[in-house]
Amino acid sequence: MSVPAAKHLRTCPLCEGMCGVEITVEDKQVTSVRPDRDDVWSHGHICPKGTTLGDIHQDKDRLTMPMLRDGDKWREASWDEAFARCEELLHGVREKYGHESISGYFGNMLGKSFGISQYGSLFFQLSKLKTVYSSSTVDQAPKNLSCHLMYGDMWRIPIPDIDNTDLWVVFGANPAASMGSILSHPNVMDAIKTIRKRGGKVIVVDPVNTATAQKSDQWLPIRPGTDAALLLSIVHTLFAENLVRLRQLENSVNGLEELRVVANNFAPETVQQFCGIDADVIRELTREIVRAPRAAIYGRIGLCTQEFGTLASWLIDVIAILTGNFDRVGGLMWSNPSTAHLGLTLKSFPVSYPVVTGHTRVRGASLVLGMAPASCLAEEIATPGPGQIKALLTAGSNPVLSSPSAGKLDAALPMLECMISLDIYLNETTRHAHVILPSQSLLEQPYWDFWSWVFALRSGGKYAPPVFERPADQPHDWQTQLRLGWLCAGNSNATFDLDKLDDEFFATLCETAGVDYEVATTSFEGGGPERILDLAIRVGPFGDRYGEKADGLNLQSFKEVPHGIDLGPTKENMLPQVLKTASGKIELAPDYLLQDIPRLTAAMTTKHPEMVLVSRRHLASMNSWMHNIDTLMRGRERCTLHIHPDDATRIGIANGDKVNVTSSEDSVTVVSEITDAILQGVVSLPHGWGHDTKGAQMIIARSKPGVNTNLLSPGTLVDAISGNAVLNGIPVVIARA
Ligand SMILES: Nc1nc2c(c(=O)[nH]1)N[C@H]1C(S)=C(S)[C@@H](COP(=O)(O)OP(=O)(O)OC[C@H]3O[C@@H](n4cnc5c(=O)[nH]c(N)nc54)[C@H](O)[C@@H]3O)O[C@H]1N2
Ligand SMILES: Nc1nc2c(c(=O)[nH]1)N[C@H]1C(S)=C(S)[C@@H](COP(=O)(O)OP(=O)(O)OC[C@H]3O[C@@H](n4cnc5c(=O)[nH]c(N)nc54)[C@H](O)[C@@H]3O)O[C@H]1N2
Ligand code: SF4
Ligand SMILES: [Mo]
């Protein structure tokens, strides 16, 4: 007998777009995913990925039972058996090599799991893991660092107010593919149209004439890795032409004079050759930013994952501040999320701590704000000696495709004596695991988009209950995570008391929030992440503080409104609330950053490599993991090498020819795609491909494997002051295969 169709409202968790969707379920199958026109945030926007939420859930290759590996044979196991095996493996390594031999690599998809985000700090408390790796150091670590130094809070990243600006200058981002990043917006491309319609302007600074640049007023092709010099010459011009206007920040900044002195050496004429942008153009860009009533300066992944990622990330904010476009409508602004979540459960690094918290064992690379560079992981596993990584937890990450020195990492992982992965696939990375613990399907969990709201300039929230019930014996992801943390520290499964840990943790959160534990627990039925979410809403800026504020909100308020609640735009003049620096001012010229300037100056006098490689994204991919979804894989081959016609002619390659791309690290063979939408001397490859590895179990992905661009990314290429990987501007040689 068939059950009538049920409709479920939800937010697509796949990117920061936060599209409201309506999911139809018939006979326990998702039969459609449609945009929810009444969603208060997205108003009916959706992209091709969002329509495949059912396909992900129903993917035959998605793991639903724990998997144990013996040699190259896998078998399904019960959860009890899997956890027993985890205990045996982790304890074995601990006894033989010590606690410091256990580490982890935590990836992008962890943030999307309901619950795991809330229990991050408890996991670290339980596991006592000191050094762990994450996708932060192949992503936004430079921006975290510059915000920590400038404002005293690594997670208070200023966001461009594109709905109210007159000029949007985009450095190293392609929202036409990514849909926006550290910029949650329901429809960035529509916002670009609207800016232009109201007489404003959009300028894209990128080595590639991206789909975003093509929809904008101006494309400024820049040589990869040289943005910091360009930005410094804008600062130079601001000082030289007496254009600095701090407006309301007049008495709120330190370091103006130091900044002027540093920028003195970066006249537009000095940097033009290095950046490949004429001095006149740089001056005009500067004046345009100054002339615009409101300008928003923005830099993203192309600015972070490059040789001078931290300098560039810092200077974006500096220019916004110097031109009076900071903490102001239409410029850069801070978000005001309805949950106090981040401050509660994911603490920013205190300003009183040193920036460099230690060094890696093998290469002595800095651990910046506690982050170990992903670029160092392979050598930390492969190099013998005390502290060698012998056990690794991976969760929601696929570093064999997403991290530099991918080949070395792929070769190092089999040296581990214990590898445990929380994932939904047996893929390029998890194939090396001894135990794979299947993550809950995204549709089996409640949802609240913690991270995206943190990067949104409207406040609001939307809660959705699970669409499907999870298999009866499957723990929630956060429960699995806490159990692994427990086992890491040498404890046993037998003594794992989840409710006790949850209650104790909740009590500490209440204490942090200044709330009475008894009141908080009696005001919410049950425990777990929902209780934490409820607390975070109640003590957040719109919350009821457990009855103290009569019209305040709690989780129940959101449960009653399935299309979400919009709490309006964020406000300007948030500085007093945000700033945590010791001086009580914005630090415009932190010493730690100034010390990196000579490295930039030196690079400006060395010869450019003839060809460099950059990365690109595609609307129908999500980093490394959505290539097993048939509807997204149709159409022409996407994993191609984009190359300029003049370069192709010089090297002697025709469109569609197979070419060898060689870096100092490795070589790959890939099909060429000749296009004039890329700067001469630059080639691009998408990341997240290379699905033909032996033992991975993703049938559709394997049918169009592509190549792994991170085989070419040298782990030695890092932005040393942040530890972030350089994934753009990699010197390569191209030849016909
Ligand atoms: N060359 C190059 N490399 C890059 C980049 C680049 O631009 N160029 N970008 C970098 C950036 S910005 C990032 S963030 C990283 C991303 O790097 P990672 O975080 O390592 O990679 P993802 O591809 O997002 O991997 C997601 C993993 O989570 C699994 N997964 C999917 N759904 C779920 C789920 O619901 N639960 C769990 N537990 N797991 C799930 C997938 O199977 C996959 O193994 O890549 C980086 N690498
Ligand atoms: N469809 C889709 N959406 C995604 C993702 C995905 O994989 N697919 N990944 C998600 C993740 S994890 C992230 S972090 C975000 C990233 O979001 P975005 O930052 O928008 O990322 P990209 O689309 O890779 O755009 C980066 C741009 O930087 C340019 N670039 C490269 N080197 C340089 C340089 O030296 N200087 C300058 N000025 N530009 C440079 C590249 O040509 C490219 O156009 O996207 C998220 N959204
Ligand atoms: S834009 Fe992002 S949030 Fe919206 S449907 Fe696509 S992947 Fe999902
Ligand atoms: Mo990312």
Image (cartoon, helix red, strand yellow):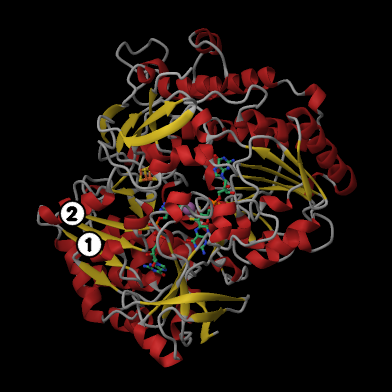
x and y percent of residue 248 in the render? 23, 47
In the rendered view of the protein, which quadrant contains the C terminus?
bottom right
Q: Is residue 386 above or below residue 86?
A: below
**On the rendered structure, is 7 left or right of 293?**
right
Residue at 65% of width from left, 28% of height from top? 479
Report the amino acid beneath label 1. Answer: Lys
* Cα gap from disc 2 to disc 1, whole angstroms: 8 Å
Identified at 56% across, 76% down, the residue is 669
Residue 622: percent from the left, percent from the top? Answer: 47, 52
Residue 330 located left or right of residue 361: left
Query: Where is residue 329 drawn, in percent x and y?
Result: 21, 45
> Tag 1 or tag 2, which sits nearer the N-term?
2
Tell me the element at label 2.
helix
Question: For mark 1, does the 10 Å Cα neighbourhood hold few (<14), some (14 to 19), or many (20 or more) residues?
Answer: some
From the image, tell me which residue sits under label 1.
Answer: 215
Residue 234 at x, y = what percent? 28, 70
Q: Say if 534 sits above or below 518 in the image.
A: below
Mark 2 lies on residue: 193
Residue type pointed to by label 2:
Lys
Give the SS element for disc 1. Answer: loop
| Residue 658 vertical placement versus 451 (above, below) | below
| 504 sits left or right of 197 in the view | right
Estimate how packed mark 2 is, as few (under 14), some (14 to 19) or many (20 or more) residues with alpha carbons within 10 Å: some
Furthest residue toward front: 1
In the image, residue 639 sits, relative to residue 493, either above or below, namely: below
> Marks 2 and 1: CB-CB under 8 Å?
yes
- Judge by depth and name the residue closer to the eye, 555 or 602: 555
Please report the residue visible at 51 percent of the width from the left and 19 percent of the height from the top: 531
Q: Nearer the viewer, residue 619 or 458?
A: 619
Q: Is residue 119 visible?
A: yes
